Image (cartoon, helix red, strand yellow):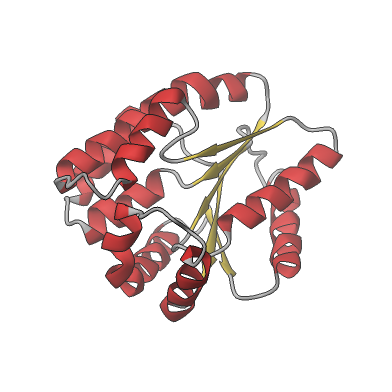
């Protein structure tokens, strides 16, 4: 196997799939080996990204699909320039909670913006950078619904994006599975209803194999 040069791993999947937990567990494993790890989220991480995240999620904003797409891409540009590229230059591990695949799924498949346009904008905003490995945590849409309701029981704020995409969970899941079939060499599909420890162990074995650790 040819050695992968960029230590960039993205985590994708429907809401409630367990991305945050698995990123935290992988970060701990890598840091225990003495590795530098940078965790990012989309949209977010940078000052601009976090501001845009609040706008995108705020229930008082009614955004057109194209405006929504441009805000995601603007956040991505800053993330690449301020965090990801500098991290790569230092040979740090980059663990991303969502990246360009999410844009294809949510703004493309669900919102209906042509995928060719999104792919061009993704490439421009990300300077052509793609994850070397994408972990796709797959859960049934019914499971996603239950996890969202359980998680949101203690929340006091409303998430516009989550609310608007809640009725599209089945479509979102299938869109991710289709992307994984298109790029099987990059995607690693994991059944996300297993225990967090079991999933973490499987991810770690995959990471060790791909990056020759």
Image side of residue 165 versus residue 92, left or right:
left
Pick the quarter of the image with the C terminus. top right
Could you tell me if residue 42 is visible in this image?
yes
Residue 31 to residue 89: above or below: below
Please provide percent x and percent y for residue 85. Answer: 53, 22
Residue 90 picture quarter? top right
Q: Nearer the viewer, residue 28 or 132?
A: 28
List the single residue furthest toward the right: 33
* Residue 37 screen position, x and y as percent: 69, 34
- Seen at 57% across and 19% down, the residue is 86
Foreground of the two, 206 or 28: 28
Q: Residue at x 44, y 63 (%)?
A: 14
In the image, is 134 to the left or to the right of 62? Answer: right
Q: Position of residue 79 (x, y in %)?
A: 45, 28
Task: Compare residues 150 and 164 and report the one nearer the observer.
Answer: 150
**Quadrant position of residue 200:** bottom right
Q: Quadrant of residue 100?
A: top left
| Most distant residue in the front direction | 156
Q: Is residue 212 visible?
A: no
- The image position of residue 179, as x and y in percent, is 39, 59
29 versus 179 height, above or below? above
Q: Which residue is depicted at the point 52% across and 65% down?
A: 151
């Amino acid at each position: 196997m040819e050695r992968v040069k960029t230590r960039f791993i993205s985590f994708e999947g429907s809401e409630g799939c367990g991305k945050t937990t698995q990123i935290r567990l992988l970060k701990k494993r890598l840091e225990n080996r003495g590795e530098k790890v940078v965790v990012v989220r989309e949209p977010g991480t940078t000052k601009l990204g976090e501001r845009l995240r609040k706008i995108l999620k705020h229930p008082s904003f009614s955004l057109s699909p194209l405006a929504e797409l441009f805000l995601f891409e603007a956040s991505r540009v800053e993330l690449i320039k301020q965090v990801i590229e500098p991290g790569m230059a230092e040979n740090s591990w980059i663990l991303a909670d969502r990246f360009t695949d999410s844009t294809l799924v949510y703004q493309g498949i669900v919102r209906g913006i042509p995928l060719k346009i999104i792919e061009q904008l993704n490439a421009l905003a990300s300077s052509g950078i793609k994850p070397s490995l994408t972990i796709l945590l797959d859960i049934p849409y019914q499971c996603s619904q239950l996890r969202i309701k359980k998680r949101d029981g203690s929340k006091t704020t409303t998430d516009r994006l989550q609310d608007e995409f809640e009725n599209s969970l089945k479509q979102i899941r299938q869109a991710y599975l289709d992307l994984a079939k298109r790029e099987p060499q990059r995607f690693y599909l994991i059944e996300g209803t297993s225990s967090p420890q079991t999933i973490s162990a499987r991810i770690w074995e995959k990471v060790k194999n791909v990056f020759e650790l």
